[in-house]
Amino acid sequence: MNSTNQSTAQNPAEPTPAERIAQVAPRMIEHMNADHSSSVRDYARFFAQASWVQLATMLTLDRDGFDLEARGGGRLERLRISFATPLNSAEDAHQVLVYMAVMAAPEHRS
């Protein structure tokens, strides 16, 4: 069999897409909460249609989406934001989160 046709399942040394995302998730979550808190809030407002959110914190990030803790108007809720397609790499995660931030930003929705 040609090595370019071998699946990841046949090469246990190669991490799966889920494992690749799990490896970078803690660093990306920390970065988003520390440096892009307004984008995290905008994700909740736009993608979860939760206009009441004043503060959001990213809790988890996986291949299929991310969970946020959302606060505002006396409410505290956990929200799940799903990706349109599963992520395969850290680069995918970066590109998708940037794209989603642009889509969710109030100035781009006016």
Image (tube, rainbow, N blue to C red):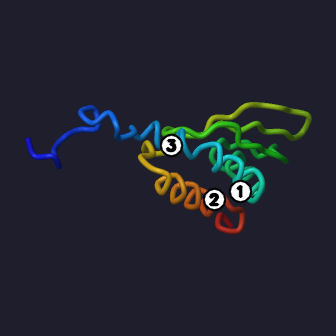
The amino acid pointed to by label 2 is Ala
The residue drawn where x is 63% and y is 35% is: 80
The amino acid pointed to by label 1 is Ser
The kind of secondary structure element at disc 2 is helix
Q: Upstream in the sequence, badge 3 or badge 1?
A: 3
Label pair 2/1, CB-CB below 8 angstroms: yes
The kind of secondary structure element at disc 3 is helix
Q: Upstream in the sequence, badge 3 or badge 2?
A: 3
88 w.r.t. 95: above or below: above
Q: Quadrant of residue 62?
A: top right
Q: Circle 3 is placed at which residue position?
A: 21
From the viewer's side, name the closer residue of 90 and 56.
90
The residue drawn where x is 70% and y is 53% is: 32
**Number of residues whose C-alpha sits closer than 10 Å to that of mark 1, classed few (under 14), some (14–19) or many (20 or more):** many
Q: Circle 2 is placed at which residue position?
A: 101
Q: Circle 1 is placed at which residue position?
A: 39
The amino acid pointed to by label 3 is Ile
State the separation of the CA atoms marked 3 and 2. 19 Å
Q: Position of residue 21 (x, y in %)?
A: 51, 43
Q: Upstream in the sequence, badge 2 or badge 1?
A: 1
